[in-house]
């Protein structure tokens, strides 16, 4: 059993109350929407690319503290990374929130994203943390239509 | 109607529930969750099962297990007798006139679908209307939407900010085009008790039949389908302390007889040839295939259990919990109740300022408190109140005031984390 304070770390609570990059990028090259029909969480991700590099990334939407903080910290982490690096980060992050461990990549460390390691102890909340990442992937692939967790 | 039942019960000076004894009947309650004593407040989703129900299931599978209406052997005779005895218990529970008016189904959802696919397909023409309310569960919306693919239209009567049906608007929508009214007896998301008797009177005066979704009413109040004069009444066994996968549809005999069958298969036929099949009489016409025999018997045991305690007494106890819970929660700053109808059953839905219900649910769970968070399969209700979700505490006969105190303390802890 894990302690609640491990799930709702100060960083998570802070990002959920004051999400960073919570805005729309006008004229974004890539954008996608994500939806979790089970809980009603909705998120939109906007990406501005400079070549294959994420020049700017932002999000908007409504959701729980875990999903909002995950989105906020994701935008901070991904900004400046290449599309490929963002994919590597997503894979490590996915491992982290589903198993509690991430095969950490030296080239692209998870950094602040490590605060979500305890999500794996709350299986019902994994989708809260990953929805925005799936949405980012969709945006980077230039897909049309909304991403759904179901 | 619930409150009326309670009012009627008062002069009899009901003795209060023997709560410790009642709780002793539910073995599941005595466990720890995340190291804390379980506080189970998710009864609107499903209620826990008393020992009498567990023993009935055990007895069926260890002593009587057999298929029904078929074998000439003793076990089959015992199984058939127990299954039909359960039907009679359901009849008495909702005071139907005849046991052949009771169709066993998987639950409320299947009951409503049965009516939509049989009565609905037979009776509704393109342009006809089905009238529901804005507080329905998805299971009393989606079957009608599917039916409407044949050209009928779904109309929705609005509710006010307290979560009460606007009867005047409802009446205005009762036009000559409406061929069926479908309404929740009690709202699962808001706790509102609808004035179903009045709704039925209004509809019948225009010759319109009424289906009542009783999923949230049957566990909490005395239901009398003849007094209500409803045409169909649906409820689920698992919310009335019975097993999952069993429920009942009541239908007036004349309506059921005129309806086509639902599932084709064994048991629903009188004779089959490749040229022509004759259907069985009601209710068997609607019970194709081997039913959930153990489930029906378990539901019968659950009905015996609540009847022994008395639905009036259960309603009075839950009303006390609702009153106490509403007082305690209303004192919490930043908490807003969703659903403040004057006539309510034991459901308290709420939101906390700046805190998403899913976070509240996770934190309460760590305190041993089981509540439901989300849209409660009533997304249009959430939309009506412009919220994505609520946290919902719902009561059963075994809940205590102390558990409500534990919920209040848990909510304070939730607020502390996000302070």
Image (cartoon, coloured by chain):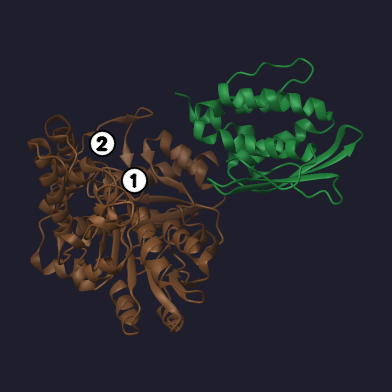
Chain colours: A green, B brown
Q: Label 2, secondary structure: give it.
A: helix
Q: In the rendered structure, find residue B29 and report the number of the disc placed on it.
A: 2
Could you classify mark 2 by the number of other residues whose Cα lies within 10 Å: few (under 14), some (14-19), or many (20 or more)? some
Residue at 32% over, 59% down: B261
Q: Is residue A3 above or below residue B226?
A: above
Q: In the rendered structure, find residue B334 and report the number of the disc placed on it.
A: none
Percent position (x, y) of residue B229?
Answer: 24, 73
B283 sits to left or right of B245: left
Using the image as rendered, state which of residue A56 and residue B146 is in the foreground. Answer: B146
Q: In the rendered structure, find residue B41 and report the number of the disc placed on it.
A: 1
Q: Is residue B185 above or below residue B59?
A: below
Residue B193 visible (yes or no): no
Res. B132 image quadrant: bottom left
B86 sits to left or right of A40: left
Res. B164 image quadrant: bottom left
Q: Earlier in the sequence, mark 1 or mark 2?
A: 2
Residue A88 visible (yes or no): yes
Callout 2: chain: B
Residue at 80% over, 41% down: A142
Percent position (x, y) of residue B356?
Answer: 54, 47
B228 sits to left or right of A108: left
Percent position (x, y) of residue B175?
Answer: 44, 83
The extreme front residue here reads B275
Disc 1 to disc 2, C-alpha distance: 11 Å
Residue at 38% over, 55% down: B348
Could you classify mark 1 by the number of other residues whose Cα lies within 10 Å: few (under 14), some (14-19), or many (20 or more)? many
Percent position (x, y) of residue B43?
Answer: 32, 48
Quarter of the image containing the C terminus of chain B?
A: top right
Q: Label 1, secondary structure: give it.
A: loop
């Amino acid at each position: 059993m894990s302690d609640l304070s491990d799930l709702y770390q100060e960083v998570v609570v802070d990002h959920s109350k004051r999400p960073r990059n919570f805005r729309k990028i006008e004229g974004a090259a890539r954008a996608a929407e994500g939806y979790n029909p089970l809980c009603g969480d909705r998120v939109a991700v906007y990406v501005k690319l400079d070549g294959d590099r994420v020049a700017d990334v932002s999000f908007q939407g409504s959701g729980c503290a875990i999903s909002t903080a995950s989105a906020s910290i994701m935008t901070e982490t991904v900004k400046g990374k290449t599309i490929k690096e963002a994919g590597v980060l997503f894979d490590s992050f996915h491992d982290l929130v589903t198993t509690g461990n991430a095969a950490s990549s030296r080239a692209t460390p998870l950094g602040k994203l490590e605060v979500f390691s305890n999500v794996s102890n709350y299986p019902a909340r994994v989708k809260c943390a990953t929805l925005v990442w799936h949405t980012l992937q969709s945006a980077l692939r230039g897909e049309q239509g909304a991403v759904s967790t179901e | 109607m619930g409150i009326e039942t309670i009012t009627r019960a008062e002069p009899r000076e009901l003795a209060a529930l023997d709560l410790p004894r009642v709780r002793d009947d539910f073995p599941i309650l005595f466990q720890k969750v995340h190291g804390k004593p379980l506080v189970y407040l998710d009864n609107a989703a499903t209620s826990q099962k008393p020992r009498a129900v567990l023993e009935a299931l055990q007895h069926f599978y260890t002593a009587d297990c057999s298929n029904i209406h078929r074998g000439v052997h003793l076990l089959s005779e015992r199984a058939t007798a127990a299954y039909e005895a359960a039907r009679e218990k359901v009849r008495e529970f909702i005071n139907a006139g005849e046991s052949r008016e009771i169709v066993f189904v998987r639950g409320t959802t299947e009951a409503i679908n049965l009516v939509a696919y049989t009565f609905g397909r037979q009776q509704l023409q393109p342009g006809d209307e089905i009238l529901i309310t804005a507080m329905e569960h998805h299971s009393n919306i989606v079957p009608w939407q599917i039916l409407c693919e044949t050209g009928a239209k779904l109309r929705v009567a609005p509710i006010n900010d307290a979560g009460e049906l606007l009867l005047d608007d409802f009446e205005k929508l009762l036009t000559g085009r409406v061929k069926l009214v479908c309404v929740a007896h009690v709202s699962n998301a808001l706790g509102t008790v609808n004035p179903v008797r009045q709704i039925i009177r209004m509809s019948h005066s225009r010759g319109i039949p009424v289906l009542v979704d009783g999923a949230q009413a049957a566990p909490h109040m005395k239901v009398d389908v003849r007094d209500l004069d409803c045409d169909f009444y649906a409820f689920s066994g698992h919310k009335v302390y019975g097993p999952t996968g069993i429920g009942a549809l009541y239908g007036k005999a004349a309506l059921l007889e005129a309806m086509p069958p639902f599932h084709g298969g064994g048991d629903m036929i009188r004779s089959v040839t490749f040229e022509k099949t004759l259907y069985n009489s009601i209710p068997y016409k609607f019970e194709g295939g081997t039913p959930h025999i153990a489930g029906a018997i378990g539901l019968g045991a659950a009905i015996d259990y609540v009847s022994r305690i008395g639905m009036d007494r259960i309603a009075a106890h839950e009303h006390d919990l609702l009153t106490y819970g509403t007082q305690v929660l209303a004192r919490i700053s930043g908490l807003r109740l969703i659903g403040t109808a004057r006539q309510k059953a034991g459901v308290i839905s709420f939101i906390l300022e700046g805190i998403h219900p899913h976070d509240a649910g996770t934190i309460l769970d760590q305190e041993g408190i089981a509540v439901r968070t989300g849209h409660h399969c009533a997304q249009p209700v959430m939309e009506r109140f412009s919220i994505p979700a609520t946290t919902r505490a719902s009561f059963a006969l075994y809940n205590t005031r102390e558990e409500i105190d534990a919920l209040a303390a848990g909510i304070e802890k939730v607020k502390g984390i996000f302070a």
